[in-house]
Image: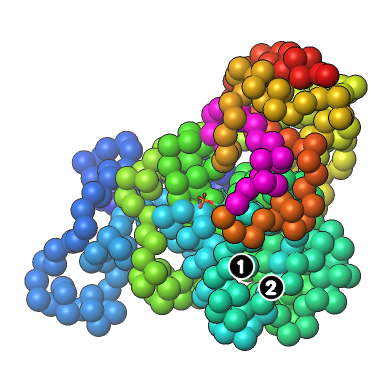
Amino acid sequence: MNTNKPRVTPASPSTTVAYDERHFANAVVPPIFQNSLFTFESFADMEETYAGKKVRPVYSRGLNPTVRAFEEKIAKLEKTDDALGFASGMAAISSSVLSVVKPGDRIVAVEHLYPDAYRFFEMMLKDLNVSVDYVDGRDTDAVAKAMPGAKLLYLESPTSWTFQVHDIAKLCDIARQHGAVSMIDNSWASPIFQQPATLGCDVVIHSASKYLGGHSDVVAGVVAGSSEFIGRLRGQILPYLGSKLSAFDAWLLLRGLRTLPARMREHQRSGLFIAQKLAEHPEVEAVLHPTLGRNLPDGLTGASGLFSLQFSSRVKIPLFCDALSIFKIGVSWGGHESLVVPALVSRAQVGGPNSALRFGVPENLVRLHVGLEDAEDLWSDLSAAIDAALQ
Ligand SMILES: *Cc1c(COP(=O)(O)O)cnc(C)c1O
């Protein structure tokens, strides 16, 4: 913020996450601007700011420099004009969708989208008289057939639970032909392995609680897109819905981002190792991993550590979960720790429309997050738990 040296424009993700402009007092890490308001130098300073003649932080619900540093990095990583932070991934999703649709509109969404996005669509959007049609995203013809008249195409690839991979470029092209906005939840791949804007997607959303943060210590979200889209979200939606990312959470995210490329390489390596071992195991019926044993689909350049498997009927899933010691039973993913979630429990979940039932997530399915522990240790844990769960 105070250098006369020529500016470089970091090109690769590893440099983007590691590099910062000089900060106050040359601190090597950006400070946390833990303040609600910023005072004005003078009457003229305030007047010019209100008249839109200059942009400067006024109040942290709007612009906060720590949050801004995070947003700028995400825009660079996703190769978009701009990005906007949110208090959660769901705030990023609901705010983005609400910025596009109005009562009477229709959305086309892929099946197996994130369960709480499904609940938001089925409960709040329905109440606002916005309808949603769900289509198998692998079937581009079916998506094309559903599109006429739709305002928004809502994508997630790979999908939640089943990890279906879709042809993002083709689907976004179809949306464009129908004058619809395309939006994707890119949390699984992170910008390290997939940059949907380069495939023609208009709006890219993340739950930053997952890989971007990477340490299971923050709930946050972010949206990346054109200056026009993000400008509208920043000016007309976020200030009033108010789901602002806090400065401290943005600082945690900046810290997490530093190691994102290195962490993703490790999640990929260990995830593939475990997925391969499971695929060879006699008690495993199927491994639902987006890249194992397949060519990488267009635009997806790697795999994270989250995937599912289906057990044979001989494996008792409650016993398997209880027999694990390194893997813990828990929701979410993207942190350092390995986790397991059985679909059985999600199928029985109460409290709103149930996407696991609606889209038929099988009872014998278990989702794994392969964390950053030693891959051989993780495999020993899993194989011992399978043995303990055989009946
Ligand atoms: C967790 C998650 C979300 C929601 O993010 P929060 O930060 O928990 O609000 C959205 N999409 C996907 C794919 C997720 O896994």
- Answer whether labels 2 and 1 touch (C-beta < 8 Å): yes
Helix, strand or loop at mark 2:
strand
Percent x, y of residue 6? 38, 51
Query: Does the magenta segment cover residue 13?
Result: no
- Judge from the rendering whether residue 347 lies leftward or rightward of residue 96; answer left or right: right
Mark pair 2, 1: CA separation: 7 Å
Helix, strand or loop at mark 1:
helix
Question: On the image, numbered disc 2 is attached to which residue?
Answer: 132
Which quadrant of the figure contains the C terminus? Answer: top right
Q: Amino acid at mark 2?
A: Val
Mark 2, ligand 1, within 8 Å: the answer is: no
Percent x, y of residue 96? 53, 68
Magenta part of the protein: which range?
A: 334-350
Of mark 2 and mark 1, the one earlier in the sequence is 1
Asked whether the viewer can see residue 196, the reply is no
Question: On the image, numbered disc 1 is attached to which residue?
Answer: 121
Res. 217 image quadrant:
top left
Res. 288 image quadrant:
top right
- Judge from the rendering whether residue 299 lies leftward or rightward of residue 211; answer left or right: right
- Judge from the rendering whether residue 364 lies leftward or rightward of residue 120; answer left or right: right
Query: Does the magenta segment cover residue 339?
Result: yes
Res. 303 image quadrant:
top right
- Judge from the rendering whether residue 144 lies leftward or rightward of residue 4; answer left or right: right
Residue at (16, 74) in percent of width and height: 46
Residue at (64, 60) in percent of width and height: 353
Percent x, y of residue 92? 50, 61
